[in-house]
Amino acid sequence: MIQAVVVLAVTLAFALIPLRGLACASCGSGSDDPLILWPNEQLKTYVGFSTSSRFETVDPQGKFGKESGPKSRDALTLAVGKALRNDVFFTVTLPVQQNRLEGSSFRSLGDPMIAVRWSWWLPDFTEPLRPQLQLMTSYKLAHSKSLQETTRTDLLDAFGTGIPELKLGVDAFWGMSTIKGGLALAGLFPEERRLGRTAVFPGNGLRSTSTVGYSLGGDNKILAGLVREMREQRRSDGQRVVQSEVLAHSIFVTLDWSPAPHNMIRFSLSDKGRVLENKNMIAASSLSLAWLAAWE
Amino acid sequence: MAGRVGMMNLEFQPPKIENRNWIVVAVVAVCVGLLPGKSIASHDITKPAATCPPLDNEKLKDLVDHSESKKVELVFFSSWCSDCGNHLKKLEGPKKILVGTFDKQPRIERLVAKLKLANRCFTDAGIAKKLKVTTVPAELSVTSSFFAE
């Protein structure tokens, strides 16, 4: 019984991470990194607003349960990116989130993240089949409360997993033609952490993002993609928790519009947990609107 | 599909990443990235037919001084810029000078050779910044008054 509660709690904690604007996987946006710098950009900012709703639990058998937690979650995400040289940059992302349920709401700073990307291969317009290849690493701090640390019965003050996580991956994007495509693969390595009386290890994971897109001229484009995330069994006090593997699929569509040089408006819709097979996760629907601007 | 996924062994056995270890990994990743000129993008297997030497302030002044009209027209481009390809293909005649910027010299030379352009080409060595070129493709005319400022 206790194990089931722990499994459910940790599952919910992970799944209640708000879906950030799931912009194109690897065009220069990355599904987890909202901000990508091109070689001619030295400083860039991201201001995004997203709202997620229709939260539903998905059990180990893939069945939907009743709605739980907040009715909706809004997030204001701020990010800044700085080039270290024209093929290496880092970004810092900070979400401010608000959970809502009927007449109640609770606001908190989310989990900050720092990311570094190295463009190992740049694309070449004379070789359309040559992708842009980026190596990426990021570290997400555990700042916000997890479900184990929440003090409210309505769970409104739970915003994060409570567990820091390292990500290492590669991102390939074919963007020189009118039809674009991308593939990103990332390993997810959380840390073990004591939550309450229990040492919790959520399980290592693998996330893949596949993208296809179409150029609308200039920097304008539309993209659609599929994100698949798998995690191994969780461990509680060193013991594997049976039937705790996570499988989550989400789909997204993104529209990039550049109204002026160095500026972009990005609109994204995404749905998680309602396509293909899913288990031990929370399904949700999201939309986001963001403004990206390069300053140097 | 459901059965295959349900039977997948999702066991990963990498070592746990502790706080200090992630710092090591991140530092290594950054250090590798900061290795100068080591990306595949800068390596050429074949010798390019085009030569695009660095274009600095002194060289640009020399070009302007030796031009009949005391004016040169520059076309800034980058190999990773898809719009630049269309722009270069539409160039009429060899009059305009190509300047590869936000890019590496071997890539620029290989690209100019592939396009078989008769235009003179250079690799930016600070001129784009002086001319406030921040996006590519970009075309600018430079006269002797630029050097008087």
Image (tube, coloured by chain):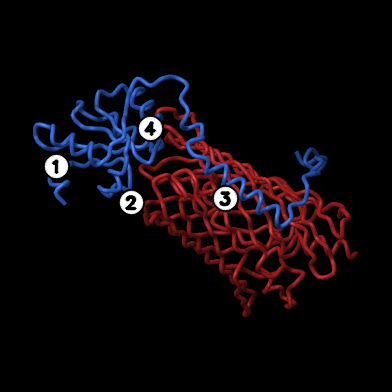
Chain colours: A red, B blue
Picture coordinates of residue A285, whole percent (x, y) = 60, 58
C-alpha span from label 4 to label 3: 32 Å
Left or right: B130 in relation to A164: left
For the residue pair A147 and B74, the one nearer the viewer reads as: B74
Q: Secondary structure at mark 3?
A: loop
Residue B139 found in image quarter: top left
Mark 1 or 4, nearer chain start: 4
Could you give the CA–CA distance between mark 3 and mark 2, rounded to whole angstroms? 23 Å
Q: Chain of mark 2?
A: A
Q: Residue at x 49, y 39 (%)?
A: B36
Dots 3 and 2 on the same chain: yes
Separation of residues labelled 1 and 3 (CA atoms) = 46 Å
Q: Which residue is mark 2?
A: A261
Instruction: Say if labels 2 and 4 share a chain.
Output: no
* Marks 3 and 2 close (CB-CB < 8 Å): no
User: Which label sits on residue A131?
Assistant: none
The x, y position of residue B40, in whole percent, is: 51, 31
Instruction: Answer with left or right where residue A268 lies relative to residue B129.
Output: right
Q: Amino acid at mark 3?
A: Ser
| Amino acid type, mark 2 | Pro
Assess whether mark 3 and mark 4 are in contact (beta carbons under 8 angstroms).
Answer: no
Mark 1 or 3: the one toward you: 1
User: How packed is label 2: few (under 14 Cα within 10 Å), some, or many (20 or more)?
Assistant: few
Q: Amino acid at mark 4?
A: Gln
Subunit of label 3? A
